Image (cartoon, helix red, strand yellow):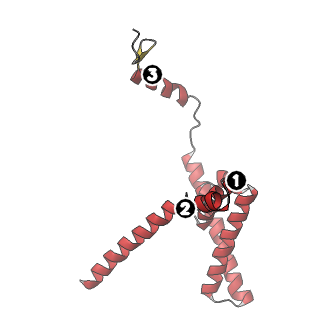
Amino acid sequence: MNDKSSINGLDKKQVAQAYEKYADQFTPKPKYFFNSFKAFVIGGLLCTGSLWLENWFINSIGLSEKSASAYVVILLVMTAQLLTGLGCFDTIGKFAGAGVIVPITGFANSMVAPAIEYKKEGIVLGVGAKLFSLAGPVLVSGITLSMIIGFIYWIIGLL
């Protein structure tokens, strides 16, 4: 059997199955419940801290609720960007999982990380071009979906 479709007497499908079985021995099994619980707790702590900060802005500084909310979002984004730039966000993300990735902090990280990675390419072709490489599809999907939902809402309002 000197044909290219077989390796050591096995066809490509058998080789692929054997490799998959071999690779499964070394692939760590995720702990879904523990990871979900950890993400829930850490995400909850992040939201609780953000709410506490917002209330502090309102009660101590005298900001309006709208202004306090904007400042909290700005602080969350800036903190995530700073931690990404310092190389700490990935470590926190590996520990916290979706608890820190899903909120606005994950969005900030998805913008800064590619920009930092491609800064050697220059300000325009590196940072500028790669800034939205991960966040761009998220923005396009979110804006498109919100337009569709808004259009449906408008049609229902006409009925």
Residues packed near mark 2 inside 10 Å, few (<14), some (14 to 19) or many (20 plus): some
| Residue furthest left in the image | 159
- Label 1 is placed on what type of residue? Lys
Report the front residue among 3 and 8.
Answer: 3
Q: What is the C-alpha distance between the residues marked 3 and 1?
A: 41 Å
Q: What is the C-alpha distance between the residues marked 1 and 2?
A: 20 Å
Question: Decide: marks 3, 2 in contact (CB < 8 A)?
Answer: no
Report the front residue among 86 and 72.
Answer: 86
Quarter of the image for residue 106 reads bottom right
Residue 15 tag number: 3
Query: Quick one: label 1 or label 2, which is nearer the N terminus?
Result: 1
In the image, is residue 79 above or below residue 11? Answer: below
At which x and y percent is residue 7?
45, 15
At which x and y percent is residue 63?
68, 89
Report the front residue among 56 and 91.
Answer: 91
Residue highlighted by disc 1: 120
At which x and y percent is residue 115?
65, 58
State how many labels appear. Answer: 3
- Label 2 is placed on what type of residue? Ala
- Label 3 is placed on what type of residue? Val
In the image, is residue 66 above or below residue 35? Answer: below
The quarter in which the N terminus is drawn is top left
Secondary structure of the residue carrying tag 2 is helix
Secondary structure of the residue carrying tag 1 is helix
> Which residue appears at 32% of the width and 81% of the height?
154
The quarter in which the C terminus is drawn is bottom left
Residue highlighted by disc 2: 135
Q: Left of 144 or right of it: where is 110?
A: right
Query: Quick one: label 3 or label 1, which is nearer the N terminus?
Result: 3
